[in-house]
Image (cartoon, coloured by chain):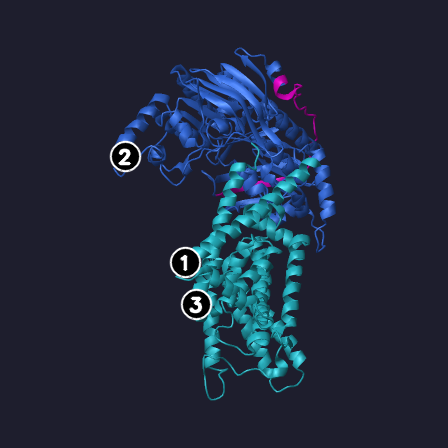
Amino acid sequence: MHIDVRDIHKHYGPTKANNGITLTVEPGTIHGILGENGAGKSTLMKILAGYIRKTSGTILVNGSARDYNTPAQAARLGIGMLYQEPLDFPPLTVLDNFMVGQAAGMKDRKSYYRREFELLVDHFNFDLNPDGPVDKLTIGERQQLEIIRLLALGAEVLILDEPTTGISREQKEALFVALKKLASEDKSVLLVSHKLQDAEALCDTVTVLRQGVVTGSVHHPYDAGAILEMMFGVPPGSPSRSAVEYGKTILSMKDVSASGGRSGLAHCTTSIRQGEMVGLAGLGGSGQEVFLRLAVGLTKPSTGSIELMGEEAQGKTLHTFKKAGVAFLPASRLEEGLMPGLNITEHFALQDRDDGFLVKWHSASETAQAKIQKFRVMGTPDSTVESLSGGNQQRLLLSLLSKDSKLLLLEHPTRGLDVESANWVWWHLHKYCQRKTSVVFSSSDLDEILMVADRILVFFNGRIVKDVRKDETDIDELTRAIVGKAH
Amino acid sequence: MDVSNNMKYATFFRFFRDVILTVIVVFSFTTLILLLAGAPPLAAYYQIFKGSLGSWLKLGQVISVWIPLTLCSCGLLYTFRINLWNIGVEGQVMMGAVFTTFVLRFGMNGHMPLLYLCAAFAAGVAGGAVWALFAGYLKTRGGIHEIFAGLGLNFVAQAIILWLIFGPWKRPGIASMSGTEPLPRDLWLPYVSYMRLSVVGLTLAVIAIVVTALMLRYTKIGLYLKAIGSNLNAAHMFDLNPRTYMLIAMVFAGGCAGLAGSIQVTGVYHRLIPAISSNYGYLALLVVMLSNYNVWISPAVAFFFACLNVGSIQLPMVLQLDSSLSGVIQGALVLAALAMHAWRMRTQKTEGIALS
């Protein structure tokens, strides 16, 4: 299907998320949309998918102008979108989710859809059990489900928003194979990403957005430098890392087990020293998230002992951990980290813990102003946090951390961030390490872990299967460890 | 600067538009109901107006209803701020009245009435607060939803009042629905004679509005209530203990409601009667929702409801309508306003707030 997007505008008050975007998607191609956070990629895609309304502009489908306002209307035209967080119904089974939106009427046609489902799963070599519940699936598996559901609905154009974020390497490879297959079957794929590698591996054409406008469109093969320049104006530098002396042990766990997540955590023994930057690798839900929550007192161990700066800490509350200088930034920023509905000033006011009865609004607003500048948050002290983009929410969370933190625990700190924001985050965290703060983070991106961590813990099925210094390992060894082939 | 000013004007305009639309919807809806009930709408509106604002005495009655409504609304603003549905506010008014009566019974023989009155008010506030704390503990320790806990406690409070009136506190010789022995005059709140209005009650209600506004806007407690209410899961990230602040909010709400109970006993009925709370607690829930949880708008909405409440008393006599019509109109009001609220949320969503 041939899609022509002409002069699309989307304005939110004075902010122009899309400011006159024009692009063409040819049938049978994979078309990449690149740009940093807040460049307007997601907005454009949501307009195409009928999820939000454009302010002005025209969309031509196979040459004729179409006006549609809902995802259902878009689906009837053959346009389907896979959102960053798959929009599915977790309590239902995989097959029920597959049937949502296509099975109408009273008649039970489960066996028919089961055959359809199996055909599609085989076609793409996906690994999905039709009778399992969706809430037990990983993000990658939920994507696979969503893709075949959209195809069964008759999608000719498939839009994917940051599909490689938060999924494993195998799932990514399976996804890429499936997308290439789709393109060879004359369907069009629109791939939104801020990862250059994804575009290089997959896309026939790449359109780059910056601040709501198209800054360039290029065809395979690509000149990475040129694309980066279109994305950022000037190519960003890589973060540098200077050697740090490690200090005393800050956190140690002995034979700790706890439940939670997909696999829980079993018999974990390890220790973290001052100034260390430790990366937690592993497939999503292999125990990293339990580890981080144990280390900040959010989860209590069922057995084993935890020591914080030489003192017994298991069974203590989050309050005790926080007082000792432990800070935790969860992956779901708006759900667990920030307060939607409150503005930036109010967040800084919340942090102020002197004994006064009144809120010092004046100083909170000054702090907010200063931190916004220092951390380059795109927003004003009056901006509510949910109006910030993901990258800016992360910057705000980092700006809320105390300078005197002893141990920082971060869950996917750069998930959904563009290259420049991610580099900035690492630069900022390295400054913490130089002040003898220990940083422990989880990430689904092995390249990133290898780039920034001093030491790597690999989790598999609730156990730490590898604990190595960065310079003593390589990507192949880590990849094997992640899937449980450590030895 | 220009941009933010424009935004402010836009926000103000939208608010203004919503208020006007709400009023139009509410009036058309109410008119429809009056027509369905076979009443001439204009005559009915006129009767309600005359019955509520037609004389000083009527205005005094309206304000006497407005006082407990406003006090309960102020209390509910704290609990709504932290996202608690304090439906037990009704029972908290009752327990405030019970505690007040309890203290005043010791002062019946006439020495130092002012001291007994002050003690009675303190007891009323405490009574409401304790009753609210029960619901609060059931919520924070027992995991029982505050709506069920509150509703249950409302029934218990009502039963306690009936038991007291027909049991230990019954009038000598007779026990009747008309309540306990009337209080001697020196234990009544002083009132303006031609309006039958207690100035003390009015002053306390106004103070409650101002204090609530300041508390929510300028104190840390206000900020913490808002924060926890907006995202319970992130509260611990900011080292806030939701349980503590839920209990604090309940205490404020119960205290305000208890104060309303004290005023009902000392300023309006001068004794404990079975219907001492007069459903003002439930009505206050609607007032606060209708005013969009705004501390400055809710007194106005409360006044409107008070007018409706007092003004519709004579509708049955004058227009031969069923006396339950006033309740139907109030319910219709709330439905209309909630529909407007839902519509507003929808337009906000499509007009778009978040950036991608």
Magenta stretch encompasses residue A230 = yes
Image coordinates for residue A330, horizontal then vertical, percent: 56, 39
Q: Which residue is mark 2?
A: A110
Label 2: element kind: helix
Magenta stretch encompasses residue A423 = no
Q: Quadrant of the C terminus of chain B?
A: top right
Q: How far is mark 3 from mark 2, CA to CA?
A: 61 Å
The boundaries of the magenta stretch are: A229-258
**Chain letter of the residue beneath label 3 in the structure image:** B
Label 3: element kind: helix
Q: Are marks 1 and 3 in contact (CB under 8 Å)?
A: no
| Residue A127 shows in the view | no
Label 1 neighbour load within 10 Å: few <14, some 14-19, many 20+: few
> Do discs 2 and 1 belong to a common subunit?
no
Type of amino acid at the residue the image marks with label 3: Leu
> Do discs 3 and 2 belong to a common subunit?
no
Image quadrant where residue B124 sits: bottom right
Q: Residue at x 27, y 39 (%)?
A: A106
Image coordinates for residue A114, horizontal then vertical, percent: 29, 31
Instruction: Report the disc number at residue B35.
Output: 1
In the shown orientation, is residue A155 left or right of residue A473?
left
Image coordinates for residue B56, horizontal then vertical, percent: 60, 71
Q: Quadrant of the N terminus of chain B?
A: top right
Image coordinates for residue B232, horizontal then vertical, percent: 55, 48
Label 2 neighbour load within 10 Å: few <14, some 14-19, many 20+: few
In the image, residue A315 sits, relative to residue A265, either above or below, namely below
In the image, residue B83 sits, relative to residue B156, either above or below, namely above
Instruction: Report the disc number at residue B319.
Output: 3
Chain in blue on the image: A
Type of amino acid at the residue the image marks with label 1: Leu
Chain in cyan on the image: B
